[in-house]
Amino acid sequence: TYDDGTKYRIEHAGRVSQDVFQTVAGFFCAIAGFAFVGRLAVRLTIRRKLYLDDYLLIFGTCGLVAATVIMYRFTHLIFVLNALKYDKSILPTKADLNAIGSAQGINYSLIAMVWTATCCVKLCFLASFKTLISNVSIRITVWYWAAVALSIIQWILGFSVPFIICPSVGNDIITHCTPETPYVKTLALNTFVTCLDFVTDLMIVSIPIWVLRNVRIRLTQKLAIAVFLCLSIGMIIAGILRMSAAYHGGYWDLTWQYLLLYLESCVAITMASVSAFRSVFVEQKRRREQDQ
């Protein structure tokens, strides 16, 4: 076990302390969870059944739940790995040293589940836009399917990047990837995936703008679209923050990267869930018109 001073240094290695890490992650996860349950309730009440976009969101939420379990289960190990970068005086315990050998599996699982949540939300929106682009133009159809293809490619890359950066497993991780992965490879691949994330977000956001740019709609509908756009921009800002501040003190800050990537997926689930609440107001208006 570690003495109190060493525990403190481990829990405060990098930009984010362990308490803040867990509190912020838990807060955003709770918001995403409540929003998701609300969406399901709305859809089952109004639609009476679930469609493809709903199933994609359910799958993405399962990914977020899995990522949450992994992250909380191995928070201590994440902070130990981060502390080994910033404080060379820390000597890991035998148990932690053995656990480092399985760090790649943990890293792979966590990153894969987080990207599953985020990319399923992208596909969820694209599935809901399918009827919107019907019989509009060839250009928007090509744009739509390009967004689908790039979102799937991004998902695959999200799974693959951890192993491309550090293909070592077991005790070889300690030799080749601890305390730090290769700088150039890590920077290049993470930047590429993040840029692809931005591109797909912008492509998805542009679809309703493109289709509705010449359509006269009410203020409430414009506000609904504005909320969607603001949340999407929020995801892009989170991605920029993750990349711009990830390299801290001469090392890649694991805690910052994991937290921001996780928060992106929470915001994504929340965004997809909140977008369904508009149907409540549409249904209320329809019923009022019927009563009149």
Image (spheres, rainbow, N blue to C red):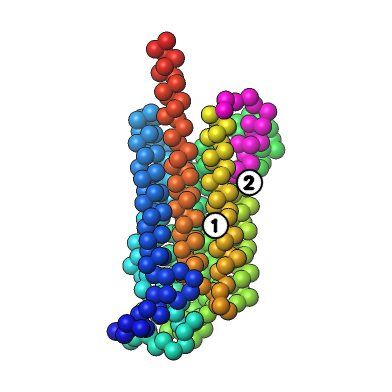
The residue positioned 60% from the left and 36% from the top of the image is: 208
Q: Main secondary structure of the magenta part?
A: helix
Q: Is residue 110 visible?
A: yes
Query: Which percent across, then down, holds residue 173?
Result: 47, 81
- The amino acid sitting under disc 2 is Met
Q: Is residue 65 left or right of residue 121?
A: left
Q: Is residue 221 above or below residue 52?
A: above
Name the quadrant of the N terminus.
bottom left
The residue positioned 58% from the left and 53% from the top of the image is: 236
Q: Residue furthest left?
A: 1
Q: Is residue 105 visible?
A: no
Name the quadrant of the C terminus.
top left
Q: Depth check: 43 or 56 in front?
A: 43
- The amino acid sitting under disc 1 is Ala
Estimate the spatial distance between the alpha carbons at disc 1 and disc 2, rounded to whole Å. 17 Å
Q: Is residue 53 above or below residue 104?
A: above
Query: Which percent across, then down, holds residue 5?
Result: 36, 83
Q: Earlier in the sequence, mark 1 or mark 2?
A: 2
Q: Which mark is residue 238?
A: 1
Q: Is residue 148 left or right of residue 113?
A: right
Q: Residue furthest top?
A: 292
Task: Count how many numbered circles sit on residues in the image.
Answer: 2
What element does badge 2 sit on?
helix
Q: Which mark is residue 208?
A: none
The residue positioned 57% from the left and 38% from the top of the image is: 226
The span shown in magenta is 204-219
What element does badge 1 sit on?
helix
Query: Which percent across, then down, holds residue 142?
Result: 66, 41
Q: Depth check: 135 or 174 in front?
A: 174
Find disc 2 in the rendering and name its residue.
203
The residue positioned 49% from the left and 61% from the top of the image is: 260
Q: Is residue 92 above or below residue 160?
A: below
